[in-house]
Amino acid sequence: MAYVDGFVAAVPTDSKAAYKKHAEDAAVVFRDHGALQVVECWGDDVPDGKLTSFPMAVQCKAGETVVFSWILWPSREARNEGVEKVMKDPRLSPEENPMPFDGQRMIFGGFHILVDE
């Protein structure tokens, strides 16, 4: 059964082009190592919450935009194998493809698909 890795991050708004290039380059690596799909979404209607919200979750600051992303894998096993290879792939080293955002504020997790209509 397919498996999804989900991500939410705060990216400096003026780094949108750099983030897009980073994401496009990373997507190639993830696909090369078994991912079926890589989707990157730039926040457009992401309201601040009173108790919880995407901006609060990633400690979004003024001048930053929330990014919501996911990677679709054939299975959790394929994801585990693929991510292990991705982490060793020199194309994603900090020197080759630096993250244009604060990775410490990124939230992420792996998910089994419950409904797929």
Image: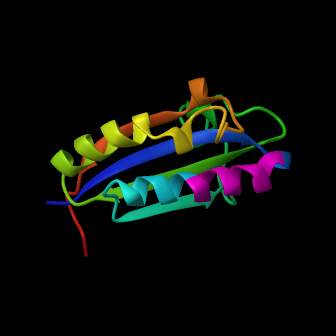
- Furthest-left residue in this view: 1
Q: Which residues are magenta?
A: 15-25
Q: Residue at x 40, y 65 (%)?
A: 37
Image height of 18 relative to 51, above or below: below
- 12 vs 41, left or right, is right
- Furthest-bottom residue in this view: 117
Q: Is residue 53 visible?
A: no
Q: Quadrant of residue 31?
A: bottom left
Q: Is residue 111 magenta?
A: no
Q: Quadrant of the C terminus?
A: bottom left
Whole-percent x, y for residue 42 in the image: 66, 57
Snapshot colouring: rainbow
Taking depth in this image into account, of 114 and 72 the one nearest to the observer is: 72
Whole-percent x, y for residue 75 in the image: 18, 54
Q: Quadrant of the N terminus?
A: bottom left
Q: Residue at x 70, y 50 (%)?
A: 19
Image height of 9 relative to 69, above or below: above
- 80 vs 61, left or right, is left
Q: Residue at x 58, y 23 (%)?
A: 104
Image height of 4 relative to 89, above or below: below
- Furthest-top residue in this view: 104
Whole-percent x, y for residue 114 in the image: 19, 58
Q: Residue at x 45, y 41 (%)?
A: 89
- The number of numbered badges drawn on the structure is 0
Taking depth in this image into account, of 96 and 8 the one nearest to the observer is: 96
Taking depth in this image into account, of 57 and 24 the one nearest to the observer is: 24
Whole-percent x, y for residue 5 in the image: 36, 47
Q: Is residue 97 visible?
A: yes
Q: Quadrant of residue 17?
A: bottom right
Q: Main secondary structure of the magenta part?
A: helix
